[in-house]
Amino acid sequence: MFNGSELRLRKALDSKTPIIGSWIQTSSPTCAEILANAGFAWLGIDCEHTSAGVQGVENIARAIHGRNTALLVRVSRADIIEIRQCLDVGAAGVIVPMVETAAQARTAVAAAKYPPDGVRGYCFGRMNDWGACFDEYAATANKSVVVIAMIETKAGVDNIDEILAVGGIDGIFIGPYDMSGSYGVPGQTQHPHLKKAYQSLVEACRRHGKVAGQHIVKSTPGKLNEAVALGYTFICLDADIILMHQSARAVMETAKETFNIK
Ligand code: 3PY
Ligand code: MG
């Protein structure tokens, strides 16, 4: 059922107030528990670039249940059955990668919403406490379930107005690394051409009254300040693998200095 963390996410998206999440790349329920306990309001689990799958989503949904963190799934694509299964095992919503057309955005929304708004199928599942809360979930799901379109190619930028015009799309989430590849400057996520594209996306969100989000894959205070200034409110910071990598390196550096190991 939709609990406090999911309602808080919905409220933040509707009111365009900042909400901070992080990312699970390891598919690990343990990492998800640790990040949830750290206070992130939402976690995105990556099913596009990992082997997590729907079973992995269900394991993580169980791990963070009751920890005041909403679970979003970055599905592999706008696929009706994959989106349905992720929601049925307890995700609060989906982040759909590589959206470049209004047709893809419409498919994503249709997958996530029950009729008449979409084609989501009804069932007794984890999301409605195995049928115990069927009526309540069915009555509130279309409003509560979150659908975010990832914009991470030049085609997505070019078609942003028609993508954002699709009803049921809550907003966008920029994937800076794919965007850098699409603009021919792989890894240069702060390249002036990209910054111009980011700016045009945020302005489009403002025009359409939709939320602007970005994955700040390696966060710094400077990038956070810039995100605030530009008007992003749906923010994802780092990822389990990045946070582990950075702190492991820092600890090892200190140990090498202390023990004078070359
Ligand atoms: C990207 O940078 O392309 C991403 O998908 C980040 O999540
Ligand atoms: Mg990407």
Image: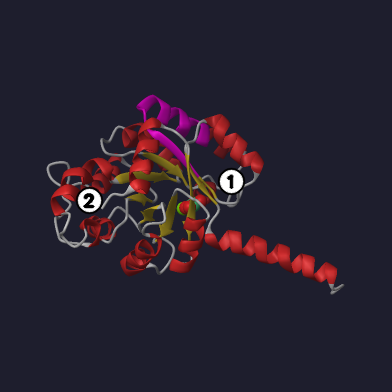
Residue type at tag 2: Ala
Quarter of the image for the C terminus: give it. Answer: bottom right
Out of 99 and 262, give the one closest to the viewer: 262
Q: CA distance from mark 2 to mark 1?
A: 31 Å
x 24%, y 59%: residue? 88
Look at 35% across and 50% down and name the residue there.
96
Q: Is residue 210 magenta?
A: yes
In which image quadrant can residue 154 be found?
A: top left
Is any part of residue 74 visible from this angle?
yes
Give residue 248's quadrant in the image. Answer: bottom right
| Residue type at tag 1 | Thr
Residue located 35% across and 61% down the image:
61
The x and y percentages for residue 134 are: 15, 54
Q: Residues within 10 Å of mark 1 (few under 14, many from 20)?
A: many
Looking at the rendered structure, the secondary structure element under dot 1 is: loop
State the residue position of label 2: 111
Q: Is residue 124 above or below residue 149?
A: below
Q: Position of residue 34 (x, y in %)?
A: 51, 62
Residue range of the region highlighted in magenta in the rendering: 197-214
